[in-house]
Image (cartoon, helix red, strand yellow):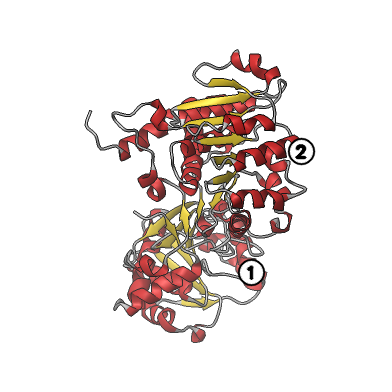
Amino acid sequence: MTASLLTPEEMGRADRLTIEGGIPGIDLMERAGAAVARAAADLTPAGGRVLVLCGPGNNGGDGFVAARLLAENGYLVDVYLLKDPAGLKGDAALAFASMNLPHKVLPDTVQVAGELFEEAVAPDAVIDALFGAGLDRPLHGLAAMLVDVINSAPAPVVAVDLPSGVNGTTGQILGCAIEAHTTVTFFLKKPGHLLFPGRGLCGEVTVADIGIKQNVLDVIAPQTFENGPALWLDHWPVPDPVGHKYARGHAVVFGGPVAATGAARLSATAALRAGAGLVTLASPPDALMVNACHLTAVMLKKISGAEAIPELLADTRLSAVLIGPAYGVGPKTCAAVEAILEQDRATVLDADSLTSFSEKPQKLFELIRKTQNSVVLTPHDGEFARLFPDLVDVDRLSRVRTAAVRSGAIVILKGPDTVVAAPDGRAAINANAPPWLATAGSGDVLAGIVGGLLSQGVTGFEAACQAVWLHGAAGQEAGPGLIAEDLASALKAPIRELVDKSCVWST
């Protein structure tokens, strides 16, 4: 199983490589249309009516095949085209010729578009074969009218490849877009299936095998992935059966002042639960007693300011560092971050450590580039905008990729569709986070998980991806109504799942 995602351009290349390898394009289209027909049949009573709306390209060709197969199996099929079929080319023209069904070309009027759903001909399901993932301009005219009419009708929609109006690379809506019940895509998912707002319009996504072999990926070398164990399980830190806590890494979390101690404790507990053998919370003197009253397995170390950091990190057994959760914003935080990065440890910079550099982000990036170890930044949209103000209006995937290259760090842009990007161009889109993770302290837990994995020697990109997936899985395990304190214990179930998949010793 591959975690790769293909942009529309890469998918086009996969098609071409397959055709050059001896499989005719019309065969790929036949298989794609068959998958769409099965999805429509699942939503339609036997002998029911299916409305098939076909665009002028290969997406429409898939619709022609689906229409023919549905008709052959006893369904009532109404086929409408956006354009005169005389303009069809290639495989789409072949599919139209073999369809051999009555069809109409839609005139450019709202009234006629609405008539498609009159009671006498109301469909049980609609196949959206208008435009696929490669759409790169806003819908207008008749296509835009159809979107409004279809979205207001009660019939469920099967989208071919991607709901019409959604960009396959960015997930952005181009003017307007179909709201699908089910989306059938081919070979591999596209980024637009996972990135909002497109993800919210796809419904259930089915990936159909149409005969493209996995070895085309060796040529295409995609750099975008769906985040999950298929991407990084080989990097999961499997404990040594004869190992001990000192061999599993030691993470250090820097805590904030006495009135803001909870965030660092959430991070430290999460780092320990994520597998770090030891975790120390480096606490300001005035907060030491408060932290001591709340911690058990996490150790405490009194530390006064940035000037004490080199002495603390002179102990090379301290393998990863996290700073930022409720640490405070200002020059003192900048000094502490600089002192940490000069010690060349795997580092997580979160929350206040990012905001503190909002007036001088280039200074932070210069510090990061001098390190030889992994540095992971964990901004939400607001913190990201403060560090990378010129990227705010760039699409989400490109935004994070550019930020990773510019900063020299692994960047986790948090959100419902969290994206992780590395300076080498790799990017992973996460899709398992439930909405109830949007609660105070949730990000502190995520930062702690990253730190715990880094402390065990997991490389930066893999540690970030593992942490984001575990965070989402813990949110699912804890369920609706969770608070951040629930997440560390909820990590046990997904961690057990990963251990069971990756460990080979017998019990």
Q: Secondary structure at mark 1?
A: loop
Question: x, y percentage for residue 412?
Answer: 57, 47
In this rendering, does residue 351 appear at all? no
Q: Are marks 1 and 2 in contact (CB under 8 Å)?
A: no
Q: Is residue 321 visible?
A: yes
Query: Which residue of the protein is positioned furthest toward the left in this rendering?
Result: 506
Q: Quadrant of the C terminus?
A: top left
> Who's the residue at 55% across and 56% down the image?
423
- Decide which of tag 1 and tag 2 comes sooner along the chain: 1
What residue lies at 50% left-to-right and 87% top-to-bottom? 86
Q: Which residue is mark 1?
A: 139
Q: Is residue 434 above or below residue 87?
A: above
Quadrant assignment, res 351 = top right
Q: Quadrant of residue 26?
A: bottom left
Side of 110 relative to 239 (left or right) = right
* Marks 1/2: CA–CA distance: 49 Å
Q: Amino acid at mark 2?
A: Pro
Quadrant of residue 137 in the image? bottom right
- Which residue is nearer to you in this view: 133 or 336? 336
Q: Nearer the viewer, residue 461 or 53?
A: 461
Q: Position of residue 170 (x, y in %)?
A: 58, 60
| Res 360 label | none
- Relative to residue 383, is residue 300 drawn left or right? left
**In this rendering, position of residue 461 left or right of residue 308:** left
Of the pair 445 and 123, the residue shown nearer to us: 445
**Label 2 crowd (10 A; few <14 / some 14-19 / many >=20):** few
Q: Which residue is mark 2?
A: 331
SS at mark 2? helix
Label 1 is placed on what type of residue? Leu
Above or below — where is 26 with respect to 351? below
Q: Is 231 situated above or below 6?
A: above
Give the image location of residue 43, x and y in percent: 42, 54
